[in-house]
């Protein structure tokens, strides 16, 4: 769109146009291309000043929430791993069962009661067969209980320490408590049964059972040791027998090799002798044939009359 300028008459008679109106349409911040010149620093400051501070607060809150959730998830995962570790640690350690000799004892006791035995009676100088059978059954039960009793006694300090420091799972602690209660009840029950068989026996029965258990263990170890020594002796004898057999076999193989070599040598010598005899016989035959041919030749050209007359002409 064009604009009309104001005409001015000069004193010399010339006329000029005032373009102040046109210049007013242009911003002094533009260059020759018509694109405004913007100050970058001024613009950035204006943008920053124009940002709402609540936005920074919201970003900080979101970052904090993400970090907090991440830390909590990591802590929970680590805690689950620790609980799983202690839950699975020695899972069968306290899965104890009473020995079968417990039921066997009550079977023997029932038979003895049916036969007339009464609890609390002293055996006296001559114990009855029922009294003796029942005492033996109870001692066998007590000896068979020794492994689980010593197991609980050995594990008790460690489990109490772990529980006091919260280093074992609830499941494992309950398993230990159940096993300890079962073993304690068994110990007291054995003592009560011992007093029924022989008053006062409850004071020494566990000590006697421990001694018998150690004796049986030593006897078992000695039996295993003797068996191992016997097996080693048998193995040594077998090794010696194998070595002897191998030596005899090696000796036999050496003698056999010599015999075979001598047989082969004799066979080769015999064959060579046969070959020489055959060659000699062949030479004699050829010599005889040559003499025969020579005789035949002489007979053909010699004789009484000599050559026939007129043979040459």
Image (cartoon, rainbow, N blue to C red):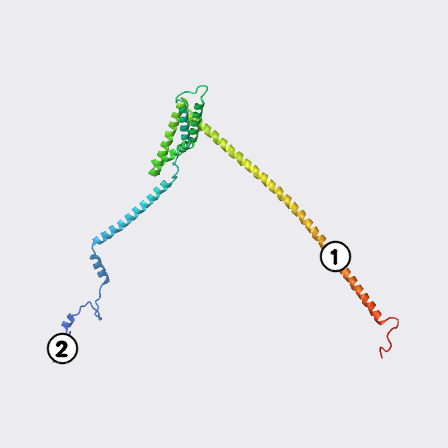
Residue 274 bears which disc, if any?
Answer: 1
Q: Residue at 55%, 38% (x, y): give it.
A: 232
The quadrant of the image that shows the N terminus is: bottom left
Q: Residue at 30%, 47% (x, y): give it.
A: 73
Q: Return the residue at label 2.
A: 16
Q: Residue at 79%, 65% (x, y): give it.
A: 289
Tell me the quarter of the picture where residue 158 sits. Answer: top left
Tell me the quarter of the picture where residue 281 sits. Answer: bottom right
Q: Nearer the viewer, residue 22 or 92?
A: 92
Badge 1 marks a residue whose secondary structure is helix
Residue farthest along the right direction in this orientation: 304
Residue farthest along the top direction in this orientation: 125
Examine the rendering and report whether any part of residue 216 can be seen. yes
Mark 1 is surrounded, within 10 Å at the Cα level, by few (under 14), some (14 to 19) or many (20 or more) other residues, namely: few
Judged left or right of residue 21, residue 195 is: right
x and y, in percent, of residue 2 in the image: 15, 74
- From the viewer's perspective, is residue 181 above or below residue 295? above
Mark 2 is surrounded, within 10 Å at the Cα level, by few (under 14), some (14 to 19) or many (20 or more) other residues, namely: few
Q: Nearer the viewer, residue 111 or 83?
A: 111
- From the viewer's perspective, is residue 217 above or below residue 26? above
Judged left or right of residue 300, residue 61 is: left
Judged left or right of residue 141, residue 269 is: right
x and y, in percent, of residue 91 in the image: 38, 39
Badge 2 marks a residue whose secondary structure is strand
Tell me the quarter of the picture where residue 288 sits. Answer: bottom right
Label 2 vs 1, first from the N-terminus: 2
Q: Does the CB distance between marks 2 and 1 fall below 8 Å? A: no
């Amino acid at each position: 769109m064009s604009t009309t300028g104001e005409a001015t008459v000069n004193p010399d008679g010339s006329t000029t146009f005032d373009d102040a109106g046109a210049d007013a349409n242009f911003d002094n911040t533009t260059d020759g291309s018509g694109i405004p010149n913007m100050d970058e620093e001024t613009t950035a400051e204006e943008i920053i000043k124009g940002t709402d501070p609540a936005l920074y607060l919201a970003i900080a809150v979101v970052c904090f929430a993400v970090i907090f959730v991440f830390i909590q998830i990591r802590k929970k995962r680590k805690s689950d791993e620790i609980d799983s570790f202690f839950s699975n640690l020695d899972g069968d350690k306290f899965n104890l069962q009473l020995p079968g000799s417990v039921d066997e004892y009550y079977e023997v006791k029932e038979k003895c009661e049916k036969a007339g035995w009464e609890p609390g009676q002293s055996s006296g100088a001559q114990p009855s067969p029922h009294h003796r059978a029942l005492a033996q059954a109870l001692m066998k039960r007590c000896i068979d209980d020794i492994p689980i009793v010593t197991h609980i006694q050995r594990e008790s300090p460690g489990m109490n320490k772990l529980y006091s420091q919260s280093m074992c799972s609830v499941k494992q602690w309950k398993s230990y408590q159940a096993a300890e209660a079962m073993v304690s009840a068994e110990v007291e029950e054995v003592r009560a049964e011992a007093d029924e068989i022989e008053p006062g026996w409850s004071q020494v029965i566990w000590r006697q059972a421990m001694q018998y258990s150690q004796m049986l263990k030593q006897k078992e170890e000695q039996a295993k040791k003797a068996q191992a020594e016997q097996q080693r002796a048998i193995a040594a004898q077998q090794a010696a027998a194998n070595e002897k057999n191998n030596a005899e076999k090696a000796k036999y193989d050496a003698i056999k090799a010599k015999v075979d070599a001598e047989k082969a040598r004799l066979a080769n010598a015999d064959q060579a002798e046969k070959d020489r005899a055959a060659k000699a016989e062949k030479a004699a035959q050829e010599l005889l044939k040559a003499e025969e041919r020579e005789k035949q030749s002489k007979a053909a050209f010699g004789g009484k009359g000599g050559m026939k007359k007129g043979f040459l002409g």
